[in-house]
Amino acid sequence: MRVHFTEFGKVRFISHRDAARAFERAFRIEQLPLAFTLGFSPRPKVSFGLALSVGHESDAEYLDFELAEEIPLEPLAAALSAALPEGIDVPAVVALADRAPALQEAVSAVEWNIELTVDDEVTGTPMITPEIVEHRVEALMAAPTLVLERVRKGRTASEDIRPAFRRMTVLGPTEGGILVGVELATRPMSVRPAELVAALGSEFREGRVRRTRQWIERGSERLDPLAADPRIALEARAS
Amino acid sequence: MTSLWPRIEPLLAGVEKPARYIGMERGSQVPVHRPGSVSWLLVYPDTYEIGLPNQGLQILYEILNERDDAVAERSYAPWLDLAAALREHAVPLFSVDTHRAASDFDIVAFNLSAELVYTNLLECLDLAGIPIRSEQRSETDPLVVAGGHSTFNPEPMADFVDAFVIGDGEEPVGEMTECVRTWQGGGRPGGRVGLLRALASVPGVYVPSMYSVEFDGPVLRSVTPRYSDVPAVVDKRTVADLADWPYPKQQLVPLIEVVHDRLNVELFRGCTRGCRFCQAGMITRPVRERPTEQVRNMVANGLRRTGYDEVALTSLSSADFSGIDNLVSDLVNDQIGCGNVGVSLPSLRVDAFTVGIASEIQKVRRTGLTFAPEGGSWRLRQVINKLITEEDLYSAVEGAYSQGWRRVKLYFLVGLPTEMDEDTLGIAELARNVVKVGKQYTKQASCTVSVGGFVPKAHTPFQWFGQNGTEELHRKINMLRDDLRKTAATVRWHDPKATFAEGIASRGDRRIGAVIERVWRAGGTFQEWSEHFQLGRWLDAMAAEGLDPDWFVTRHRTEDEVLPWDHIAAGLHRDFLWQDWQASLQAHGLPDCRWTPCYDCGVCTDYALEHVVASSVPPAGGSQGTGQDLTLGGAVPVMLSPTRVPT
């Protein structure tokens, strides 16, 4: 099964791990017949997609789980939403084909809406306009490389993060700043929204950040994770 | 009177674990504050992770919100990063439920379950914009209330707390609500003092400003009521039968990981084992067991509601619950209808821990096992009246190792009355033998020896005992570490310096309030966190107030001395406590009075209460009070239920 969920509002302050625990409890509250791993300490077969950082919202989070027996699919989304904390909702659950690739490997691109703000204690009055941001975005996308010092496994290494930037557009002003829409590849390396904000300019701060899409790309195809590996038989039954 | 959330939200981006401050737990409430309803803010003055699971706070939260005339919300001490941000941006302390300012509540009530959180109470008040001293508060400031075990000696906090609730809070919170409502509805007669005077008449409520305290040099002479309608002695409140209080019905399920992150169901309150060091056991008498059927329902409903897969059956000594074996067995074998659940039994007594229980609880998950022999020799365990034999301990750990546990934790106190080095080294001897028992079952057998410095507490037979100083505790701990070097036993210990500060706050009188204020003003919050604790702050504060720390901490008290908590009654007769103190010095043990004739400690007789047990059969294990000859010491055999081979 693949669950699509969203995370908005106060609950965005929980960590990825906290969200995982909330789902595990929701599965038990709804008494879903989860499949368990074999072995000394059996664990439910649940695998989460890309992590969502503390403070970030999302329209597009996913997790996969396996059931030990078939159950009606229809009521599942609403039932899980009710058992989850306020602010985490499940718009859809679909049955996956056997041996569907794991989310973590399958997802190759993500889209974000990132609000840029300016720390007004530094500059006095916030001087941020769509035009300024537009210039920075153009400059960044025009640059052939963008080398960053990053800490990986305890070692600092120089990495060119420019290949991850697919598309960047200024969406317009918000109450406290400027909203930028971004599409980032997750391979060969992923880029954090905070790194992107810093790359646009050291005076910018990260305001509200929201993941809007995740994509599974296969050849020239670009698929929503819910549509990537459907299990046809079960879907037909559910409809 | 509105939500502070828009002002709090931007601050959360810059703090550690922001989800501490968002509320929204399953089971949390969004109460509607109505005119005429009395609003309570229940504050646990430590981090969210420590405070959220507190059952006392959750019980009162539900009871108050069920009332038509009250609403209750919660708050926890903001961590240092948020505290600084709140001050910088002039945002006051808030509730996590509706993010309402603390000063908007009628009553701000603190849970004081340990003394080292005292400075955090001042921090919370200050962040709330409420004057920290009672005398500085005006009619518009909230009433500041405190309850919890530490309030059995309220005097160190008497300058800051308007009213203490002594004992079980279930009933007095309702009576206080009515008292405040009547006062508010009646045009606030007599102003703030009028309210305090009215509260002083609520049974179990101690209003320190209604008493005058006389000293003669350093010596406390008396604490006497200033008005005739104020009681000379405040008796604790006791819920007679837990069956009437099946709370919490909707245990909170936090969004982030907290301590005791599982379903907690209270098996019983009170303990009659009579361990002389144990304040909790002394002040919560008599034993009140919850009916087994109610326990089963609370477990079943709780698991279904929360989605937890582990339940802790809590009490001061869970294996003593009559019928514990059947309960645990039914739980793990899914006789309660919630699937397989892990069961943990905190506070296990070795003499009541049987192989039967061990084999049952390991079926689902091997939760951590901690046993608390407390003393290293049979003689010392007679002194402290923890009458468990070496064989009890070895049988219990054998039960554990034989059922697959590889590590057990043993808890001991050092600095106990009459303790000699051979007693301290007895801890090492026990630990070595425990490992030896374990090695018969697994090569990896090990044990953790956790050592705490003993702090004598009010309303115990050891309230007269002079605590060991920091050097003496260090010496004993180091001796133990040396003796257990290169063994499979790991020694962990509590910082003797923190033990010393706890000693100041535990048996202090009203003069200690100024010391606590100084420690807080010097930046001493979160004193239970070793990285934030400095004994220097406490000693500097004592010196500045002209008080001798040793007079408060290491000095033995005399029989005729007025103790700072003599006007607070836990029901235990002073004569009884003194006799028990004398008996302890003779290494004379006293059996569990549940299964033996009453020896008249005073609680049941004075308060017309009785022990309530769920079953008339004593628990399976036990050398204490089960008719075995105590004088035999190490030779007493233990009855074990038959070993069940796990399938």
Image: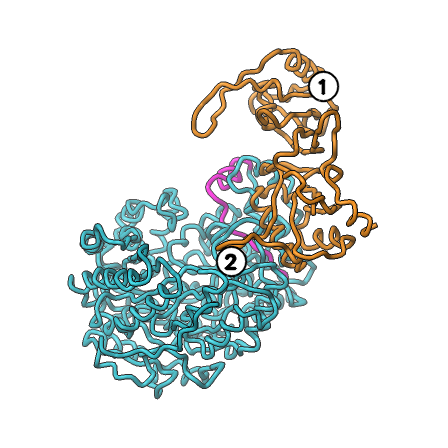
Q: Is residue B593 left or right of residue A92?
A: left
Dot 2 amino acid type: Pro
Q: Which chain is orange?
A: A
Q: Is residue B6 above or below residue B328?
A: above
Q: Is residue B144 magenta?
A: no
Dot 1 amino acid type: Pro
Residue B595, can we see it? Answer: yes
Q: Which residues are magenta?
A: B70-89
Q: Which mark is residue B53?
A: 2
Residue A165 % position (x, y):
65, 21
Q: Which residue is mark 1?
A: A130
Q: Spatial distance from mark 1 to mark 2, Cα to Cα?
A: 47 Å
Residue B459 % position (x, y):
34, 71
Residue beneath the point at 53% across and 77% down? B292
Residue B77 % position (x, y):
49, 49
Residue with the most extreme right position: A239
